Each structure stands twice: as C-alpha cells, then as structure tokens.
C-alpha cells in the first residue's frame, strides 16, 4: 500500500501525450489547445466610440457645434472634424479624424440647422483606443489550455475558425460482478442495479474524452479477460469498477498480468478507495477502481480525471477553497488519508454530509467537494479552516 501522493505521481508520470488534430471551433469546447493562439489583428482595430453620441474636439466643447454626418457601426467616416464641428456616431463606430472625444447623446442639446450644444458637467473621452485590448502578435491563449466558452470568442477574434487540439482519449468502462443488473432490470434477491458504469461514463464526458460502455463482466476469470481484452482493442484507457480487492472472485489484477500489463499501483492508503489498481502496457492503461460507488466516484476525481487531462497535455488544477468547519469532525481509524464529501451551508461553513460508507451513493448528490483529513488525524475542531477540493 502506497501513499496517495506517490500514487498520484506514478499515474501522471505514466501519461503519454496524444496526437494532435484540427477541429472547428464549434466543436472545440472542453478540448485542450495544442498550439499557442497568436492574434493577427489589433483590438480594437481602430479608435472607436464607446457609446452613442457626438464625436468632436475637446477644445470646442463649450461651443455650438455643426453636425457633419452620421457614422453607423461598420461604416468608415467620410468627414474630417474641424473647428466647431462634430459627427453623430453610434457605439462601436470608427472615430472620425480630428475628433478626440465623444459626447453622450444624453448630454447633448439638439439645436436647429444641424447644430448641437454640450450640456454635461464633465468631459469624458468615451473612446476605445486602437489596440488597447489586443495587439498584432499578442499570445492570447497558451497550448495546454482547456477551452472554455469565453476562449472560443478569443479564438474567433484571432481568426482561428479551426484550432489545433490534442485528440481525446477513448475510454472503455466495465463493471464487474454477478450481483449487477442494468438499471432497466428489477433486481431480484441478492442483485443490485449497476450504477458505477453510468456514473463513470458521465464523469468521463465532463473531461471531453470519449467513453464507451462495454458492459457487466461476470465474476469469472475468463469473462473478465474477454471483457478487458475487447475494451482494449478500441480504447486508450479501460476503467473497471469492482474485482480489485482480495476476494475469491476478484480477478482483475491477475487478468491484467495475463494481458502483459505492468501493475504500477495495487493499493493506496486512502479512504475511500484503498483497493485501487493502475496498470500500463505501452500506450494502453487500466484503472481498477473499487466497486462501491462513492469510492469509484472519488478515485476518478482524484486520479483518473487528472490522468485524462495529462494525456491531452493539460495540467488539471482543481479549485481548492479554505473555509471554516461547521462542527467538529471525528473519525476512528486514522491510518489512511481520508477524502470526506462535504457541502457548504447557509453560513458559508463546511459540513460533512451524512455518509454511511462507500456504498452510500446518494450522499454525493448535494456535495460541493472533498475535504482531505491527513493520516494520523482523528479530530478536526469546529471553526478550523479546512481545505476543500471542488468536484
């Protein structure tokens, strides 16, 4: 049994960066950028009006001004602003030559014969200056960044209608156990519905990887071998839930060896999730997660998610906050690092959720994150500032 920190390093150091591909920006959300994004334009590309108003010279602000033209957005000005002259201008329109400020429409008195007079108290420029946001040659996004909706706007601005990204890993998902039936089956005596595969499938989707549900492997070595072998043919990673403990029907570690996989992790000093297995064969990987739903959910978040992003050359940095504990937390056994599901109450305090063990799947439905409790710690007092990893 190894410490979690060591297991984390082993997993991430085993990752092999996937190939690159070009995708349309409409299909880029959640993927990882494989090139630095460089601007080919200035933004704004010209001095432009920050509002609807009148473009003129500051020197003439106290004078009656002659209106030369109306400048809509998307049209170039035709007139140069001279002494005691102005042009009516729309938000985003190009500032005419000679003007150095824009009077707001609300602060202008319209007179007869195409004349106006400023009636405001303060003179403001109200101009968005050329290249004040972006200059030609600026690096806007770095390789390795996970693309968010706001990044897609940046890509479009910089002319990247197609963007180079790292290919998404393909991930096969298998549950093991004769006790499992599919969700549409009414479980009989000694049977339970398979929840892990559907949970893991959804967790994979949130990484923008490509999940494949392979099915439920019966509790025989032959079936376990066949299911894993099938999943490996079309996937980069296989995730199994169950079959990794020390029971008479836990065949996953032996099958990994028969498939020529090197087992790098066979047990982790973590709660929940001690019987977690990780193995590698070239560019193929297998995670054997515990069969209990909370354990499989937690180990996916702690180890599998960072590994998936590492394959796509992205550093995964989960949001971690520090908040006060609402009530004293106790635990009896302290030999493993614990990750406790918690929520935030109305007083902005951390509360461990009611949690009956690693099979208590509905304990996670209102959870904000996971609170680590270090080895050897049996009590965390009320009011203590604790770290919480968002999930």
Image (cartoon, rainbow, N blue to C red):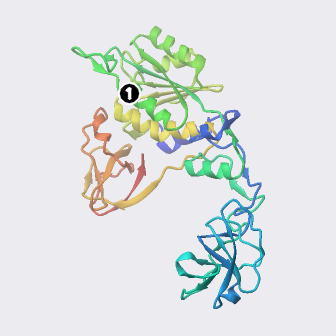
Query: Residue 220's quadrant in the figure?
Result: top left
Choose between 94 and 171: the one closer to the eye: 94
Residue at 36% across, 16% down: 248
Q: Is 47 in front, or is 140?
A: 47
Q: Is residue 106 left or right of residue 163?
A: left
Q: Is residue 211 left or right of residue 248?
A: right
Q: Position of residue 387 (x, y in %)?
A: 40, 56
- Residue in front for this viewpoint, 207 or 51: 51
Determine whether 225 is above or below 128 in the image.
Answer: above
Q: Is residue 3 among what the camera can see?
A: no
Quickly name the residue at label 1: 196
Q: Is residue 265 above or below residue 6?
A: above
Question: Which element carries disc 1, helix, strand or loop?
Answer: helix
Q: Is residue 353 left or right of residue 25?
A: left
Residue 288's x, y, as percent?
Answer: 47, 27
Q: Residue furthest left?
A: 189
**Residue 22: x and y, percent?**
70, 36
């Amino acid at each position: 049994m190894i410490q979690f920190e060591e297991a984390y390093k082993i997993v991430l150091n085993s990752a092999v960066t996937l190939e690159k591909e070009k995708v349309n920006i409409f299909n880029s959300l959640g993927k990882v950028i494989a090139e630095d994004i460089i601007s080919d334009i200035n933004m704004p590309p010209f001095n432009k009006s920050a509002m609807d108003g009148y473009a003129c010279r500051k020197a003439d602000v106290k004078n009656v001004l002659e209106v030369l033209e109306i400048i809509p957005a998307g049209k170039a000005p035709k007139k140069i602003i001279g002494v005691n002259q102005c042009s009516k201008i729309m938000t985003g329109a190009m500032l005419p030559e000679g003007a150095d400020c824009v009077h707001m429409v609300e602060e202008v008195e319209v007179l007869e014969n195409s004349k106006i007079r400023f009636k405001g108290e303060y003179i403001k420029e109200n101009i968005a200056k050329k290249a004040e946001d972006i200059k030609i040659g600026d690096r806007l996004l770095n390789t390795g960044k996970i693309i968010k909706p706001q990044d897609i706007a940046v890509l479009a601005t910089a002319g990247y209608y197609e963007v180079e990204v790292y290919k998404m890993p393909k991930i096969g998902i298998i549950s093991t156990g004769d006790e499992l039936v599919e969700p549409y089956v009414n479980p009989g005596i000694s049977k339970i519905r398979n929840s892990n595969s559907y949970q893991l499938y959804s967790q994979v989707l949130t990484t923008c990887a490509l999940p494949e549900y392979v099915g439920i492997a019966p509790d025989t070595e032959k079936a376990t071998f066949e299911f894993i072998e099938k999943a490996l043919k079309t996937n980069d990673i296989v995730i199994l839930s169950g079959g990794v403990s020390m029971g008479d029907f836990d065949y996953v570690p032996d099958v990994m060896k028969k498939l020529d996989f090197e087992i790098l992790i066979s047990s982790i000093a973590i709660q929940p999730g001690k019987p977690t297995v990780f193995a590698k064969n070239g560019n193929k990987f297998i995670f054997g997660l515990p069969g209990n739903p909370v354990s499989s959910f937690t180990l996916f978040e702690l180890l599998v998610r960072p590994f998936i992003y590492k394959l796509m050359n992205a550093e995964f940095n989960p949001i971690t906050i520090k908040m006060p504990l609402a009530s004293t937390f106790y635990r009896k056994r302290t030999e493993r690092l614990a990750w406790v599901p918690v929520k935030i109450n109305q007083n902005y305090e951390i509360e461990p959720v009611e949690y009956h063990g690693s099979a208590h799947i509905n304990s996670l439905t209102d959870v904000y994150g996971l609170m680590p409790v270090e080895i050897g710690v049996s009590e965390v007092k009320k009011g203590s500032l604790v770290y919480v990893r968002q999930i």
